[in-house]
Image (spheres, grey):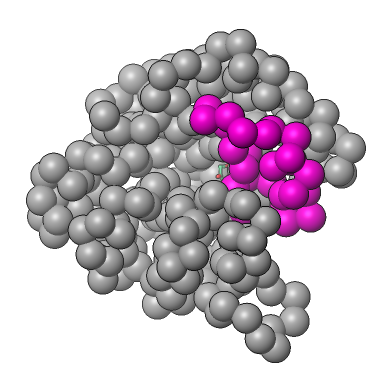
Amino acid sequence: MRQKIVAGNWKMNKSLEEATILASEVKGMVADEVKGNVKVILCTPFPYLITINNLLGKDNHISVSAQNCSEFESGAYTGEVSAPMLKSIGIPYVILGHSERRQYFGEDAKLLAKKVDVSLKHQLIPIFCCGEPLEVREKGGHEALVKKQVEESLFHLDESAVQKVVIAYEPVWAIGTGKTATSQQAQDMHAVIRKHLASKYGQSVADTISILYGGSVNAANAKELFACPDVDGGLVGGASLKSREFTEIIKSI
Ligand code: PGA
């Protein structure tokens, strides 16, 4: 059975104190209510990873993620954080290829393929983001673009490696805009991604890969989105910064 995941992407928000309070509140709720095949992931800024990881402790239902890592393993790359560093402090996940990284930091498919490789080499699970900008959807090019993004950064992986990756489909026009994809739009694209994975790796491999939806997920729309057969959870930005709303979203899964 595919893992269900609700990941909160805090982006560049919160002080250490605020982050600690939020993580404690979410942890309390998860301990009381989250059962079975569901994982909650808190994607915190780098400086808080160790603290939040320690605070969460060993719990199969909740863990932390980094929001990025370098394509290099070590060396003279001032300001960068490497996959081996994240591994050495016990971080299990890393978001790669978020549209904000692509847009503001010029990350492209080739670079992301390197980041995927270095993460997997150091046993970090990539949460690989893909998604189309509005003008591409308006011209009907969204399926082709997302397939290309997945292909260019993941299709060099072998069968066992690709099964470790979590994919997040996040239409750029839905991120932080309050404009969510309809559940039909989400389901359609998730099915396209899974079919594309199946064409390369076979259906049984494609069926093991969790595909999350991201883009203005909130407490009001999560249930309908998560009910779609190919939507295995969400990558939540703004609504993950408020413990009450985020815990409502977790309950929807
Ligand atoms: P949002 O962000 O939920 O605020 O739209 C989602 C994301 O960027 O991961």
Q: Residue visible at 42% across and 38% down?
A: 213
User: For the N terminus, which image quadrant?
Assistant: top left
**At x 62% / y 52%, what residue is drawn?**
90
In the image, is residue 229 above or below residue 20? Answer: above
Can you give x and y, in whole percent of width and height, for residue 190 in the image?
28, 40
Mark count? 0
Front residue of this view, candidates 16 and 28: 28
Q: Which residues are magenta?
A: 42-66
Tell which residue pokes out farthest to the top in this image: 32
Q: Is residue 74 magenta?
A: no
**Quick check: is 63 in the magenta stretch?**
yes
**Quarter, ligand 1:** top right
Could you say which quadrant of the image residue 212 lies in? top left
Q: Is residue 65 visible?
A: yes
| 33 shown above or below 128 | above
Which percent across, then down, holds residue 189?
A: 27, 42
Residue 142 visible in this rendered orientation of the protein: no
Q: Quadrant of residue 40?
A: top right
239 left or right, relative to 152: right
Quick check: 124 above or below 206? below
Image quadrant where one finds the C terminus:
top left
Which of the 4 image quadrants contains residue 64?
A: top right
User: Residue shown at 54%/54% (left/top)?
Assistant: 94
x 75%, y 75%: residue = 79
> As displayed, is residue 220 above or below residue 15?
above
Horizontal and vertical percent position of residue 12: 74, 51
Residue 135 % position (x, y): 40, 57
Q: Nearer the viewer, residue 152 or 203?
A: 203
Q: In the rendered view, does 188 fall on the left or right side of 55?
A: left
